Image (cartoon, rainbow, N blue to C red):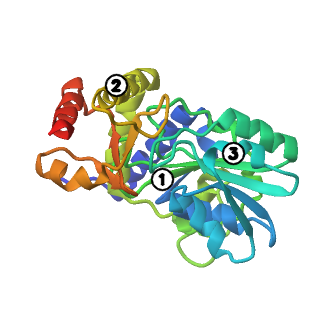
Amino acid sequence: EGRPLTSLYEDVEACRAGYARLAGVPATRVAAGASVAAHSGVIAASLPAGAEVLTAEDDFTSVLNPFHVRGDLKVRAVPLERLAESVRPGTALVAVSAAQSADGRIADLPALREAARAHGARTYVDFSQTAGWLPMDADAYDFTASVSFKWLLGPHGAAFLVVPEDFGGLTPVLAGWVAGEEPWDSCYGPVAELAHSARRFDLTHALFTFAGLRRSLDLIEELGVAAVHAHDVGLADRFRAGLAALGHEPVPAPGSAIVSVPGLGGRQPDLSRAGIEVSNRAGNLRAAFHLFNTPADVDHLLDALTG
């Protein structure tokens, strides 16, 4: 017997609340959407013409491209390790991933936060590569986002945006009927009253995605981020130690659950045929360790790289 459509929206709200607890903010500040790129687009649309946006070189496209396609913003890219020191008077926004998708390097977010505060810049952090294994304090930044299908173990089709209590000057340019204070009364004609919470930034929900994500968020919360962090980073460190024994030097990313090895990306097809799924990112072999991995998996990968 099928579930009533309205009951699936209960899953959306449960996911909103669960993600809010992970992020350390009230659920009223969490918008439920579909992609980080869409959330970035809402933030980009809020900036005045000529505003400077500071980014990290080669960060994930969804964090960057919406600012570039505006065409009238000054987007400046610097190496990740120089991000905090590159904030300057006139910088309107700093946008960065908490951990780099390509190689797992973790941004110095406390230093960035202090630099942004000193110069009156706002901050936008994408936690897609860390939410679920690295403690997240979304309240420390103006805007944060994350997809659900990576470390949060959910299906594709959901992403979250955290905004300040006063919405940070954002306009809900993508708002549809679900963004109304009374959604079922907002289906026809312009929305008469936008939601009083961050739900005004919601996008039409992929309902079956949220039905699955609800259970994934429950699992992460039951285990606790600290335990997940210890497991994931422990496996990554085991891999780093094994790589050193083999004479390989990964990209320096201390404390990250992601390990990227220059020059080995070409091994990815052979490893895949052997049942080991890793990524080839810009010629680097990228291994990301999570709850479904074991020490035996690490050793199996190292053995495969030995051959």
Q: In which quarter of the image is the C terminus?
A: top left
In three-dimensional space, the C-alpha distance between marks 3 and 2, rounded to whole angstroms, equals: 28 Å
Q: Is residue 268 visible?
A: yes
- 306 w.r.t. 272: above or below: above
Query: At which x and y percent is residue 33?
Result: 50, 57
Name the quadrant containing residue 114: top right
What amino acid does circle 1 point to? Ala
Quadrant of residue 275 within the rendered picture: top left
Q: In this view, does 117 lie to the left or right of 160?
A: right
Q: What residue type is labelled 3?
A: Arg
The crowding category of the residue bearing disc 3, from other C-alpha atoms within 10 Å (few below 14, some 14 to 19, many at least 20), is: some
Kindly state the secondary structure of the residue where label 1 is placed: strand
Image position of 148 (left or right of 178): left
* Residue drawn at 45 percent across, 40 percent down: 251
Earlier along the polypeptide chain: callout 3 or callout 2? 3
Residue visible at 58% across and 40% down? 27
The total of numbered circles placed on residues is 3
Q: Nearer the viewer, mark 2 or mark 1?
A: 2
Tag 2: amino acid = Ala
Q: Report the residue marked by disc 1.
A: 159
**Depth order, front residue of 143/172:** 143
Q: Where is residue 250 in the image (x, y as percent from the top left)?
A: 40, 38
Q: Name the residue under label 3.
A: 82
Q: Distance between the residues labelled 1 and 3?
A: 28 Å
Return the residue at label 2: 241
Residue 72 percent coordinates (x, y): 75, 76
Taking the spot 27% from the left edge, 53% from the top edge, the residue there is 3
Check disc 3 and report its element: helix, strand or loop: helix
Residue sitting nearer the eye, 65 or 28: 65
Of the two numbered discs 2 and 1 on the same chain, state the one appearing first in sequence. Answer: 1
How far apart are the alpha carbons under marks 2 and 1? Answer: 34 Å
- Label 3 with label 2: CB-CB less than 8 Å: no
